[in-house]
Image: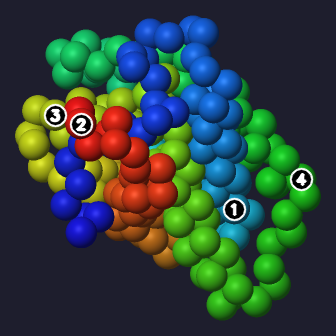
Amino acid sequence: MFLKIKNIPKVSWSSEKPYNFKPKFSTFFFLCFGLALFGLGEGLLIVSFTGASPWSVLAQGISLNINLSIGTITLLISIGVLILWIPLGQKPGMGTIFNALIIALMIDLCIKFVPTPSNYTYQLILAIISVLTVGIGGGIYLVSNLGAGPRDGLMIGLQKKTNLPIAVVRATLEISVVSIGWYLGGTAGIGTLLFAFGIGPCVALGLFLVDKIFSTDKKKGQ
């Protein structure tokens, strides 16, 4: 059952270690492909006009209480999350850098070329698709094992400390973040709630699908 997954699977194209700046082509390809899907999903959520992601709600809430822009707060939150990596034993890699670059590019492209549905039902459907896309994309790029983005690294570190399923850890993180952001005055919509409650199971589903599709004898022997 994918909801019980606790570890990031290793497959034939997974890097042996995150500190690998000369990965195999297949490893690099799946890293970029997964991040592109992740960024596409983030962009679709924005385009759906059903609510921002939980971390954006947090940034908005904090910005309403101190004299800093949402962009500056978002940067400071990312730095803060990376600092939390230290006691959790997480380490950055190529994927940490490409996470910021590719996701930002895909969000911009999505906003530019994907129109917002005029019908609210279709907006909700788009929001659901966005969460699934982020989850599957996240699963693909995490399996490449070239380093996670700030939030995913926090998720992995907390999972190792608590030994809880990845779906539970990620859902708890997102729900906590959106709750704090909403309490501080941030605006949350139905899309925000879909993301907060759905992203954990969707990331677990992404990991499960990658493991099933690319499972090898090598993986079974580890």
In this view, which residue lies farthest toward the front?
217
Q: Earlier in the sequence, mark 1 or mark 2?
A: 1
Quarter of the image that includes the C terminus: top left
Q: Which residue is mark 3?
A: 160
Q: Amino acid at mark 4?
A: Lys
Q: Which mark is residue 106?
A: none
Q: Which mark is residue 221?
A: 2
State the residue at coordinates (69%, 62%).
44
For the residues labelled 2 and 3, say whether their Cβ atoms are less than 8 Å apart: no
- Eyeballing the image, is 155 above or below 93? below
Q: Which residue is mark 1?
A: 44
Q: Earlier in the sequence, mark 4 or mark 3?
A: 4
Q: Amino acid at mark 3?
A: Lys
Q: Earlier in the sequence, mark 3 or mark 1?
A: 1
Q: Nearer the viewer, mark 3 or mark 1?
A: 3
Q: Which residue is mark 4?
A: 112
Say if residue 78 shows up in the picture. no
